[in-house]
Image (tube, rainbow, N blue to C red):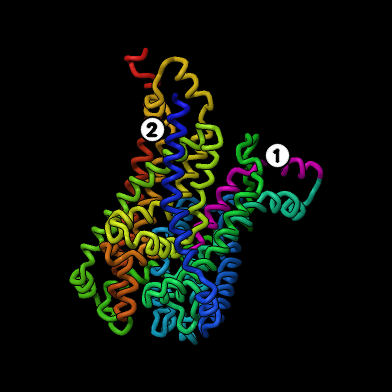
Amino acid sequence: MRKDRSNIVNICMILFFVVCVIAPLGSMLLRVTPDGARAVFQSPQFGPAAINSLSTALTATLLTLTLSLLAAWSLERTQTRGKALFGALFTLPMLIPSISHALGLVALFGKNGLLTSLLHLPGSVYGFWGIVAGSVMYSFPIAFLMFSNILRYEDAMPYQAAEVLGIPAARQFTSLTLPYLKKTMISAFFAVFTMVITDYGVPLMVRGKCMTLSVLMYDRAVSMMDYSAGSVIGALLLLPAIAAFLVDLMAPERGTDSFISQPIRLKKDPVFDALASIFCVLIGLCVLAPIVSFCLMAFENKYPVDPAFSLRHVERAAARGAGQYLINSVLYAVLTALLGTLLAFVCAYLAARKKGAFSKGLHLISITSMAIPGIVLGLSYVIFFRSTPVYGTIFIIVLVNSIHFFSSPYLMMYNALEKLNPQLEDVGQCLGVNRFYIIRDVVLPKVGHTLTEMFTYFFVNSMMTISAVSFLVPPAPKPVALMIGQFETQLLIESAAFVSLLILAVNLGIKGLTTVVSSSHSHGLNQGAVYLFPKRHC
C-alpha cells in the first residue's frame, strides 16, 4: 500500500514537470516551421548576430575558465591570507543582475566613464569587448565555485606517492591534477558558454552595433511579438544548453562519494603565496570596481559631469514605482523560494530515498530544467499559458522562476539525502513509525543547512532575474530588475544604478540573515536529531 502511494506521488510530480516544462517547450518548438526558419536565417541580422554570439561566448568562456581556475587555485593551493574574504568577494557578482555588471562597466569605461576620462583611454566599452568583459564578470562566480569545490576535496595520497617516486611538480600537474579536473573543466566550459550565449542583459546594455542572438530573440518576441521568429532563435539557443546537459549527464563520476584518506597539506612558498595574494587582490578589485561605480553613480547629480551628491535619481525611481516594483520582487522571491524549496525537497526525497523506475524518471526530469535557458523558458511559457487563467498573474512568475532555478537546489538536496543511512526508513517501518515523523524528526534536522541554502538560492536568483520574466510582464506585475533596462533605454543610468543598488542590498540582507539562521541551526543540529521517534510511538 505504501509503495503504491509513493508511486502515485512520483507520477503526480512527473506530470507536474510535464505540464510545466515539457509541454511549454513542445508548444514553442511547434511554432518552428520551415518557412519561419527560412525567414529568420535569410534575414540580414541573423548571420552577424550568430557570429557575434559565438565569438563573444567562446572568448568570454575561455577567459572565465582561466581566471576562475587561477582564483580557485590561489585560495585552495596556497597559503594566501584572507581566504574567507576573497571567497565572499569572488561570489559577490552572483547577487546582482547581469545587466548591472554592464552598467558598472559603462560607469567606468563608457565614453565619459570615470577611468576613460581619468586615464584618457581610447575607444569605449561598447561592442565586442564590452560584451566579453561583462559576461566574464557575470559568469566568473559559477566557474570559481565549481573549481574551488573540486580542488578542496582532492586526495593528497597520489601526490605523496609521486613525490616519493621523484616525479617533478610539473609532471604531477599534467598527470594527476589535469585528469582530476577534466570533468569539472568540461562541465564548467558548457555551463559558462551556455550562460553567456543565452544572456541578453549584458549585450542589451553594451552591445553597441554588436547584435547577438539573445538580443535578436528578445527584440523579435517581446518588441515585435513575432513568436515564430523567436521560437526559431530559441530552438537554436537550446542546442548548447542541451549539449551541456547531455555531457554532464553521461560523464562518469570520479569518486565524488569516496572517502578522502588525507587532505592536501599546503606548503609555505613565499613566492607563490605572494603571487597568489596579488592575483586575488587584482581579481577582487575587478569585481568591486563596477559595483562601487554604479553605487556611487546612483547618488551623483549628473553622471559624469556633475558628481555632486544628489537624491533626485532616487526620487525619480520612487516616482516611477520603484517601491511597488521592489515589493513585487520580494513577493516573487519569497513565494518562489517557498514553492521551489518545497518542490525540490519532495522531488529529491522521492528520487534519493525511493528506488525504482519512477524515482529514476523523476530524477531525470528534475534536472532537465538546467538545460533550458531562461529566455527560452519565458517565451515557451508565453506561448503555452497565454490562453489560461494563470497568465498575467503572480502565479505564472512564481512558477517560471521555480522551474528556471529548480535543478541546482534539487541536486543540493539530492546529494545531501543520499548521504543519509539508506536503511533509515526501513528501520522506522519495522518499529511502526510513520514516515512523516522520520522526515520531520530525523531527515529535516540533518539537511537543515541545505534547506537554508536552497531557500537563499531561489530568493537571490528570483530577485535579480530578467530573462524569463521579461516575456511575462506585463500583464503580470513588474519586478524591480526590469526597471534597469527601462531606465537605460531612456538614458537615465543614474536611476538604473539605484535600482541595481536596491537589488544588491536586498540580496545581501537575505544572505546575511540566512547565514545567521544556518549557523544557529548547525549549533542545534544534534539536539534536533534527538526526537527520533514521537513519544506516543515509544
Q: Position of residue 95 (x, y in %)?
A: 39, 58
User: Which residue is disc 2 drawn over?
Assistant: 523
**Local secondary structure at mark 2:** helix
Residue found 38% across the figure and 77% down from its top = 224
Q: Position of residue 269 (x, y in %)?
A: 64, 52
Give 293 or 429, whichever is nearer the viewer: 429
Q: Which residue is most to the right?
A: 165
Sequence-earlier tag: 2 or 1? 1
Mark 1 neighbour class, 10 Å CA radius: few under 14, some 14 to 19, many 20 or more: some
Residue found 58% across the figure and 50% down from its top = 76
Q: Is residue 529 visible?
A: no
User: Any magenta on residue 149?
Assistant: yes
Q: Which residues are magenta?
A: 139-165
Label 2–label 1 contact, CB within 8 A: no
Asked where in the image residue 508 lies, by quadrant, the reply is bottom left
Quadrant of the drawing holding the C terminus: top left
- Look at the magenta stretch and give its main secondary structure: helix
User: Which residue is disc 1 drawn over?
Assistant: 157
- Marks 2 and 1, how far apart at CA: 32 Å
Tell me the kind of residue under disc 1.
Met
User: Residue 105 vs residue 396: left or right?
Assistant: right
